[in-house]
Amino acid sequence: MSRSDDKRSSVVVHCALAFATAAAASSILLQRDKHGRTPLLIAIANQADLDVIRFLLLQTTSPESQAAMSDTLGQVPLMLACEQTGGCWQSHNMHRQVELVKLLLQVFPQAAQHQA
């Protein structure tokens, strides 16, 4: 999937969430693309702002289920977050990565033992 496809998907999700009930919003956030990625996985893969990731996690009725969902390669959100080391050791990016990993572990600590 190209970056422009991801952006289009993000717009669709944003519009759907703006007009959805809580139950419908939760359902939308669990939808998958052809690679098995949820909006949370797409956001992490594209290094979205932590507030966006927090929003995606906390808008579902079961944040731990959201954090446990893997893509077709078997990657859960924590695995994607840990893979993003490119430029990560710059001060701002390192702080973001640490905060992202902490957030994901708070929601779903069992992800630390997940194997793809």
Image (spheres, grey):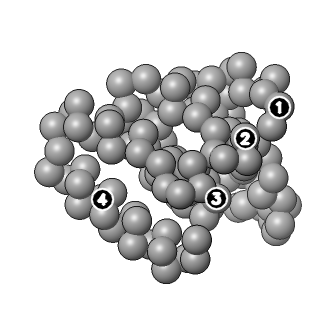
Instruction: Indicate which disc, 1 or 4, sits on the residue closer to the N terminus.
Output: 4
Q: Residue at x 49, y 80 (%)?
A: 4
How packed mark 1 is, by other alpha carbons closer than 10 Å (few <14, some 14-19, many 20 or more), is few
At which x and y percent is residue 54?
48, 42
Instruction: Indicate which disc, 2 or 1, sits on the residue closer to the N terminus.
Output: 2
The answer for how far apart the CA atoms under marks 4 and 3 are is 17 Å
Instruction: Indicate which disc, 4 or 3, sits on the residue closer to the N terminus.
Output: 4
Question: What kind of residue is marked 3?
Answer: Ala
SS assignment at label 2: loop
Which residue was labeled with disc 4?
14
Q: Do callouts 2 and 1 mark residues in contact (Cβ within 8 Å)?
A: yes
Question: What kind of residue is marked 2?
Answer: Gly
Question: What kind of residue is marked 1?
Answer: Gln
SS assignment at label 3: helix
Determine whether 31 is above or below 44 in the image: above
Of 107 and 35, nearer the camera is 35
Left or right side of 108 for 59: left
SS assignment at label 4: helix
Which image quadrant for residue 98?
Answer: top right
Q: Residue at x 49, y 55 (%)?
A: 33
SS assignment at label 1: loop
Which residue was labeled with disc 2?
74
Instruction: Indicate which disc, 4 or 2, sits on the residue closer to the N terminus.
Output: 4
Which residue was labeled with disc 3?
45
Quadrant containing the N terminus is: bottom right
Question: What kind of residue is marked 4?
Answer: His
The answer for how far apart the CA atoms under marks 3 and 2 are is 14 Å
Q: Do callouts 3 and 1 mark residues in contact (Cβ within 8 Å)?
A: no
